[in-house]
Image: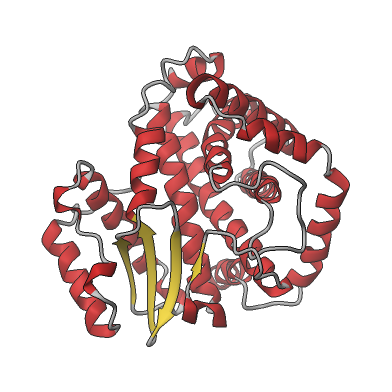
Amino acid sequence: MYEDFYIRIMSIEDYRATVKEIQNHVKLPHSEFFDMEFSPHREEFLETFTFYTDTLGRNADYGIVPAFMYFNNFTSRNAKAGLLKDTFLLSINMGTVHWLMDNFKLNSNIESSGIRFITVTSKFLDTTPQNLMYQMCFHFTVYHELAHLIQKSPYLESYLDEVPKPNAYSDGRHLLEIDADEYSSLCLGTHILQYAEKLFPTSLNTEILEGLLVLCLVPVFIYMTSFGGGKGEIYFKEKSHPHPIIRVMLVTMTICHYINQSLEVDGKEFSVDYNRVLNRTLQVAHEIEQEVFESPYVDDFIMTLRGNIKGILDYVDYFDNLKNEDNTLAVYKWNRNIEQREEM
């Protein structure tokens, strides 16, 4: 969903110059950096690097300067944000790119699966559904890490990443992760609404917008399940990250709330329904996983959700109260920026 992306795609030389500049600021080993020259996905790496480097520049008013994005050499799925020697770093594992490319962007089985929802929605897109899914996962990942940079918490000095740590629970750490998910959701909501208005400038309505929302949320759900946590009992005040099913619920809720607010401001006379979007997302994710990925993770997550609604809502309420007391969070700063623009 790079619909507003018109700047020149950066070259291998541009990327290497950025790596050199990072090393001038921070003494990271050369082996930390992935060189995509011989990667079969080289052009995708460069386009992604260009888009999100530009994104970092657009967010400089949060005080995250200097800020650099790079790819590291790890083959696992992960991303991290750090603040080293006054330099803000956003790093994506090369394995994340390869996994998302193989499972979404290049996975033609999604479009040819015969799933009715995919068949119907594909007719209205200006790209393939799998490419849209790929971009949504990447947006979610990068904007989440960007939020960690904006938070400027002490954890940045040792990096914040996306792999849950089993013995690293604290209220503060969970709050940072919830805030980063919500900030990422606001960014996703912005992209989705802009894309919907581009595709349907005069005919956008509840049914169309909810369908596009589901298509964009399904890959994020499947991507989150790939990190594990679906089987076994749900946890609340454990590990470094909230349970993935809680994260999926919060992301869906935040995006729907943001879109409805935006529609109201724009004078639109329709809205989207959170419960309908969530239930449809779970259903389509189940169908895609059964038909395309042949794994049981989504079903495990759905059972976990349905059996723990009260506990999840209690957990969400607890952290909602903590959020109200913290002006260092990324969402607080997002809202403050909007207020300042409106006052100008």
The location of residue 40, given as percent across then percent down, is: 20, 41
314 relative to 171, above or below:
above
In the rendered structure, the answer to whether residue 158 lies left or right of residue 86 reads right
In the rendered structure, the answer to whether residue 101 lies left or right of residue 151 reads left
The location of residue 11, given as percent across then percent down, is: 14, 56
At x 51%, y 54%, the residue is 187
- Residue 337's image quarter? bottom right
- Residue 22's image quarter? bottom left
The location of residue 273, given as percent across then percent down, is: 72, 35
> Which sits in the foreground, 289 or 16?
289
**Observer able to see residue 3:** no
**Observer able to see residue 20:** yes
> Which sits in the foreground, 229 or 341?
229
At x 48%, y 36%, the residue is 197
At x 33%, y 31%, the residue is 106
Residue ranking furthest to the left: 13
Q: Quadrant of the N terminus?
A: top left
> Which sits in the foreground, 101 or 259?
101
At x 63%, y 43%, the residue is 263
In the rendered structure, the answer to whether residue 69 lies left or right of residue 231 reads left
